[in-house]
Image (tube, rainbow, N blue to C red):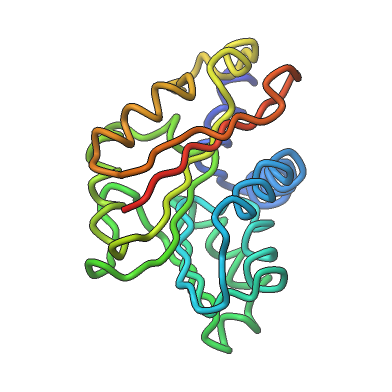
């Protein structure tokens, strides 16, 4: 497998030794700013039950459980390695009942309807085979009035990176806005940060 294709597969679902020890650290380092920006826009309060879809290296879980002090955080990822890593790194928070991590797919989430107050996903929509179905599933598990954030790097920036030629579906922020709105979310808007820089942060927000 060509190196760029291997790297693309790691970004989709970190796996093996490389995924646990290299990809996870890269994700934490390179996604730190977009994670912080996303969490700030979600206005998370202590009483909120927060869902993260695709937590990767786990920096977001650290911020949620120690920075925002959300009362309950549930996080899913399709990578068994990332789930096992989070279970080890956040064993205390899991024992305390503040955090639950598990293997899961956005298209078929093992949760009841109307459970979560906030949901977010960062740099994962590129890999969703059916975004409309995924957003319908997200909408199902959110409470009325809950907030959703989908955060991406814009197509304009991402298409300059060779690895995105392999199994990435790239989006302009307006594309995601339209998909989220069509899924039935209200007050959909885009917060596009660092649009003039090499790496941008496009955060699409909507209300259930």
Residue closest to the eye, 152 or 193: 193
Q: In this view, does 88 lie above or below 190?
A: below
Q: Which residue is drawn at 60% across and 29% down?
A: 192
* The N terminus, quarter of image: top right
Q: Indicate the position of residue 183 as horizontal and vertical percent values.
A: 24, 39
Q: Indicate the position of residue 165 as horizontal and vertical percent values.
A: 51, 13
In the image, 161: left or right of 106?
Answer: right
Q: Is residue 205 above or below residue 53?
A: above
Q: Indicate the position of residue 81 as horizontal and vertical percent values.
A: 55, 56
In the image, 120: left or right of 87?
Answer: left
Most extreme residue toward the front is 187
Q: Residue at x 73, y 17 (%)?
A: 196
Q: Residue at x 72, y 50 (%)?
A: 21
In the image, 83: left or right of 197?
Answer: left
Q: Indicate the position of residue 12 as horizontal and vertical percent values.
A: 50, 36
Q: In this view, does 122 lie above or below 161?
A: below
Residue closest to the eye, 91 or 65: 65
Most extreme residue toward the bottom is 96
Write down the quadrant of residue 40 in the picture.
bottom right
Q: Which residue is drawn at 31% across and 44% down?
A: 186
How many numbered discs, if any? 0
């Amino acid at each position: 497998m060509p190196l760029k294709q291997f790297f693309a597969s790691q970004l989709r679902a970190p796996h093996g030794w490389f995924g646990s020890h290299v990809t996870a650290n890269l994700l934490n380092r390179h996604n730190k700013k977009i994670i912080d920006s996303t969490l700030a826009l979600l206005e998370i309060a202590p009483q909120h039950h927060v869902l993260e879809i695709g937590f990767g290296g786990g920096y977001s879980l650290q911020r949620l459980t120690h920075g925002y002090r959300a009362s309950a955080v549930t996080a899913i990822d399709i990578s068994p390695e990332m789930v096992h890593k989070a279970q080890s790194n956040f064993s205390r928070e899991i024992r305390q009942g503040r955090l639950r991590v598990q293997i899961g797919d956005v298209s078929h989430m093992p949760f009841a309807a109307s459970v979560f107050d906030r949901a977010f996903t960062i740099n994962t929509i590129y890999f969703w085979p059916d975004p409309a179905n995924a957003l319908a599933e997200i909408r199902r598990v959110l409470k009325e009035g809950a907030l959703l954030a989908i955060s991406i790097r814009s197509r304009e920036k991402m298409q300059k990176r060779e690895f995105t030629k392999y199994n990435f579906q790239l989006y302009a922020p307006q594309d995601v806005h339209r998909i989220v709105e069509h899924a039935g979310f209200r007050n959909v808007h885009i917060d596009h940060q660092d649009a003039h820089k090499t790496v941008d942060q496009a955060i699409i927000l909507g209300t259930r």
